[in-house]
Image (cartoon, helix red, strand yellow):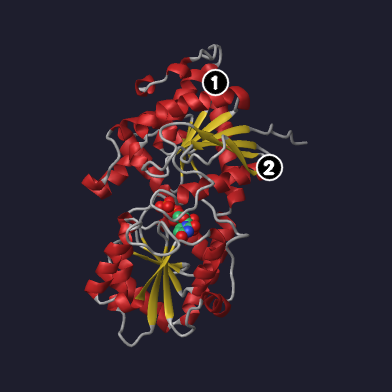
Amino acid sequence: MTTREPLLRIALISEHASPLAKPGGVDAGGQNVYVAQVACALAALGHHVDVYTRCDSIRLSACAFLRSRVRVMHVDAGPACFVPKEQLLSHMPAFARGMRNAMEHAGRYDIVHANFFMSGWVGMALQRACALPLAVTFHALGLVRQQHQGSADGFPQARIGIERRLVHRAQRVIAECPQEREDLLRLYGADAARISTVPCGVDLAQFGPRNRVAARRRLGLPQDEFIVLQLGRLVPRKGVEHVVRAMALLDARMPARLLVVGGESRQPDDARTPELGRLRAIAQQCGAAQRVVFVGQRDRQELADYYAAADVFATTPAYEPFGITPLEAMACGTPVVGSAVGGIQHTVVDGVTGFLVPPADPAALAERFARLHANAALGEAMGRAGMARVRSLFTWDQVAQGLVKAYREAIASSCEQHAGARPQLQRTARTLSLGAVA
Ligand code: UDP
């Protein structure tokens, strides 16, 4: 007979990425999707989840239900309006105090799961003040970002020290892919025994195969063109310019177009999404302007049609902590051409579910597009292989089960650490400052 493990009360912290926000803008993307889906998948397993996120609008109520057993708690920390994530660190002591106050009503949690380094800072404050077990998912690592973005990285230098402390103090560190695990070991000196590798997932109810002809008809797209899709946040690090340049390298006789989905608004607006203007200029200058269409931001329920309408999905960032969009494309049966970096190397199997190419290599991209255009059967086979891969490895249910295992390990090791020691339940959180977890 198996004994049923107790259900957990889980606090997810995601300071800038609310599960209620619309993804596609500069600061709303994969982490928002991850937090929303993880919370719902954990609740589907019977656990109770409260997601703590910063109150960034005066219209938000203190607490909102995402589904049964999932609440979104809006914490007052800094102005109740959008603040770029690079400027949020100084508001984290207020966030920790606000969360501590909310917990007086919400009750005690079995585990705190922090997402991103600033939430991790809050998690360490709670770990210290309330002896709560802590798990962390970084979503991106400061040292990796600095390597790629150099002086364009606007985060404070303090990020690196906070990440180092987190790696050593969190009872469990969640790596989203083998590359992140390696980075944690190599760059941060993490203890391999405390890392759990749990990937992101894809919602198969939302993303699944559909008829390409019908999808193109619904979107008003031509049936006879080779369509390349690029979809995601429109920021320079996503390397959309390489796909734009690749379009200019395709045979002039090949009917082809690139759809670029994403940005701050439904109607593409260069003023609100500066990356659009930059890409437009690049398209003009390299001779691809006729082949590139900027679509604008789209709601999640609209995306499956875009993925299904495309002959190929392209994603070419310089680095990618995970990358949920390749999974979404694969779930819809569309082959993926992606740069061989970060999580993309793990989700895309070169030559099987698509192609991996070096980052920043438009010629390699154009060659793979031409190959898929010349051989429709290859693209279909890759699409089927991609669908099979996401179904077997990347469902949110599997992700939630992997996280629950990591949570239980974190709780067990916290119990060991505190055995005999009286939890410090003093109200230290009321006086938290940035130095408090230094
Ligand atoms: N997305 C969206 N609408 C858009 C553009 C993007 O819903 O117009 C979503 C996309 O489907 C994906 C997420 O934003 O789920 C981007 O996540 P990814 O992990 O690919 O990139 P990140 O934002 O983490 O850099």
- Quadrant of the snapshot with the N terminus: top right
| Residue at far bottom of view | 253
**Which residue has dot 2 on it?**
68
Residue 275 to residue 411: above or below? below
Residue 350 makes an appearance in the image: no
Residue 118 makes an appearance in the image: yes
The amino acid beneath tag 1 is: Glu
Percent x, y of residue 35 = 52, 44
Q: Residue at point 41% right, 73% down?
A: 228
The kind of secondary structure element at disc 1 is helix
**Which residue has dot 1 on it?**
416
- 326 or 355: nearer the eye? 326
- 281 or 43: nearer the eye? 281
Percent x, y of residue 288 = 29, 76
| Residue at far right of view | 1
Disc 2 within 8 angstroms of ligand 1 (CB): no
Q: Would you say 366 lies left or right of 300 here? A: left
